[in-house]
Image (cartoon, rainbow, N blue to C red):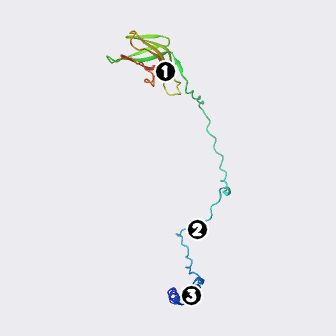
Amino acid sequence: MRSVWLAVMLLGAGNVPMQAWAQVPPVTPPPATPDAGDAPKPDDIPPPVPMDEVPAPPPAEEAPAPPKESAPKKQDMSPPDAWVPRTQATLRVMNKIDSTVQTLSVPVGGSTNYQSLTIKLSGCFVRPPDLPDDAAAHLTITDSRPDLPGFDAWMLKNEPALNMLQHPVYDVQLAGCA
C-alpha cells in the first residue's frame, strides 16, 4: 500500500506547485511496540533529583561502642631536639698507615691516649628511644707532634663525615654512647 501511495506522489509531484508541498504533513512511522530488551527512551528516564531534595538515609542502628583501652596510653613523642646524656663514649680509631682499628671507651670528662693522639671527651648524648637512633659527642683531639692538626668539635654517629678529624695518619669515628 505504501509503495502505491509513494508512486502516486512521485508521479503527481511534477503537477503540484511548491506551495502545496509545504502543506503536506511529513509521514511518520507507526510507534513500535517496546520489547523487554529495548533501551529506555529519553522520555522514559526521569530527570535527576536535585541534591537538596534527596531524602536522608534512614537512621542506622546505634554504632557499637569502641573497645576500652586495656593498655596505658603511650607518652607523647619527644621533641625533635631532645638528647639524653650518657657517661661514656665508644670511639673507633684507625691508623691509616698500617690499617689497624682500635675501639676505645672514654668516660665523660676524662681522656685517653692512642699512639700520638690524646682524646678528651666533654659530653656524650643519645636520642630518646622514641626518636631515630643517633649519638653525639664533643671531642678534643690533640697530637703530640705540634705540626699535625687537632680537633675540637661535636661528632655525630650517623653523620661521620659532617665533622671529622682531618689528620694524615688517624681517623676517629664515634661508635656510640653508653
Q: What amino acid type is highlighted by mark number 1?
A: Ala
Quick one: label 3 or label 2, which is nearer the N terminus? 3
Mark seen at residue 136: 1
* Image coordinates for residue 120, horizontal then vertical, percent: 46, 12
**Neighbourhood count class around disc 1 (C-alpha, 10 Å): few under 14, some 14–19, many 20 upward:** many
Q: Nearer the viewer, residue 140 or 166?
A: 166
Q: CA distance from mark 3 to mark 1?
A: 107 Å
- What residue sits right under mark 2 in the picture? 42
Q: Nearer the viewer, residue 19 or 142?
A: 19
Q: CA distance from mark 2 to mark 1?
A: 75 Å
Quick one: label 2 or label 1, which is nearer the N terminus? 2
Residue at image position (54%, 20%) is 84
**Neighbourhood count class around disc 2 (C-alpha, 10 Å): few under 14, some 14–19, many 20 upward:** few
Determine contact: label 2, label 1, CB under 8 Å. no
- Comparing labels 3 and 2, the label whose residue is closer to the camera: 3
* Image coordinates for residue 23, horizontal then vertical, percent: 60, 83
